[in-house]
Amino acid sequence: MIDKHLPRLCLTQLLAIGAALAQPAAAPLAFEAATVRPSAPFEAAAAIAGKAHTGTRIDSSRVDIGTATLFRLICVAYRVRPYQLSGPDWLKTTTYDIQAKIPDGVSVDKVPEMLQTLLAERFGLKLHPEKKDQPVYALVIGPGGASGIKMKESEPEPPPPPPAPNTPKPEMSVPTVQGDVKLVRTDKGISLEMPGGEIQGRIRVAVSPPTGSQPPKFHLESSGTTMKSFAQMLSVGVVDRPVVDMTGLTGAYEVAVDLSLDDAMNVARNSVTLLPTGGGGGGDGGKGAGAAGANLADPSGSSIFASIQNLGLKLEPRKLPLELLVVDHMEKTPTAN
C-alpha cells in the first residue's frame, strides 16, 4: 500500500531544493576599497635604511603591502607554497603596492579570501587545480634504519617563567598576510612560532657570529616537531624542491640542524616577506631557486643535507604527483583604482 502522504512529501522536498537552488550565490569576500599601484624599483640600500615601501602591515581595519610580486600574492591568497603554483615567469618579478580597507566586522583571517577577489577583479586572474609529477625530496629513514635515528621524542615544554617587574616583554610579533610570526627571546636564542599551524612546534634559532672570511651560521632547534612539520619546514626555501615526509614516524621530536647564511635568507624570503626572489618555485623543479638551489646540485656539499643525515634521516630525489594551481590568465596592468 502506498502512503498517501508520500507524493506531498516529495513535492515539498522538490520545492525546497528548487528554492535553495534559486538563491543567489553569496558574494565573495572583498575589501571595502583597495588601491593597487606598480612598485618603485627595489633598492636594497633603501630597504636597509627603512626608507623602502616593503613588507606587510596588517591591523584590524587596513592592509598595507609593499613591493609584492603577483606570484607571492597568489600564494598567499590561496594559501599555497611557491612550489604549488605554476605560472609565467613575469609573475615572480613584477611588483605592486596594495593598500586596502577591511570591511567592518570582518576578521583579518579572511584577508587571503579578499585577496583572491582583488586579484580576480583587478588583474583578471584565472587558474585551475592540476595534479602533476614533480621533482621532490622524500624524507626517509637513513641506511641505519630505525636504530640509527638520533632524535629523541619531545617532552611537554614547561611554561616560561614570568618576567621580572618593569621589564619589556621578551617577545614581538611580525605581521604577515599569512598570520603573525611570533618571536620570543629566550636564554637559548630566539623562538619562532610560525603562522597557520602548518609548521608545528617551537623553533629556536641561534646565530654564530662571523669569523674571519666565514659568514655567520644558524643553528636551528625545534621541539615537539612531527616529521610532517619538519618536511614542511625544509620546503620553505631551505632546499630546492618540496619535501615529502615518507619516514613513517608518528611521534614529535627534538630536531636540530645547521643552516648556512644562504639557507637562512631563503627561509626568510619564502616564509615572511612577499619580496621578489629572482625565480624559484612554481612547479619548475627548483630551477632558479636562488642560492639554495645553486648549492644543492651536489647534496653532499650542503650543510642542511649533512645535518639531516646526522639525524639518521635522508633526503632522496624522487618524482611524485603533487597538487598544483596553474595560472591560465593574468593581466600585468591592473584595472583603474
Image (cartoon, rainbow, N blue to C red):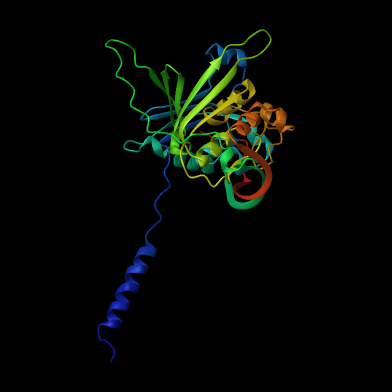
Where's residue 33, x and y in %? Answer: 43, 34
Quadrant in the picture for residue 145:
top right
Where's residue 310, x and y in %? Answer: 61, 31
| Relative to 301, 57 lies left or right | left
Residue visible at 64% across and 23% down in the picture: 262
In the image, residue 130 above or below residue 135:
below
Quadrant placement of the N terminus: bottom left
Given residues 300 and 331, the one toward you in this image is 300
Quadrant in the picture for residue 91:
top right
Given residues 131 and 256, the one toward you in this image is 256
Quadrant in the picture for residue 80:
top right
Q: Residue furthest bottom?
A: 1
Given residues 225 and 92, the one toward you in this image is 225
Where's residue 249, x and y in %? Answer: 52, 44
Asked whether the viewer can see residue 38, the reply is no
Residue visible at 55% across and 34% down in the picture: 150
Q: Residue furthest top?
A: 212
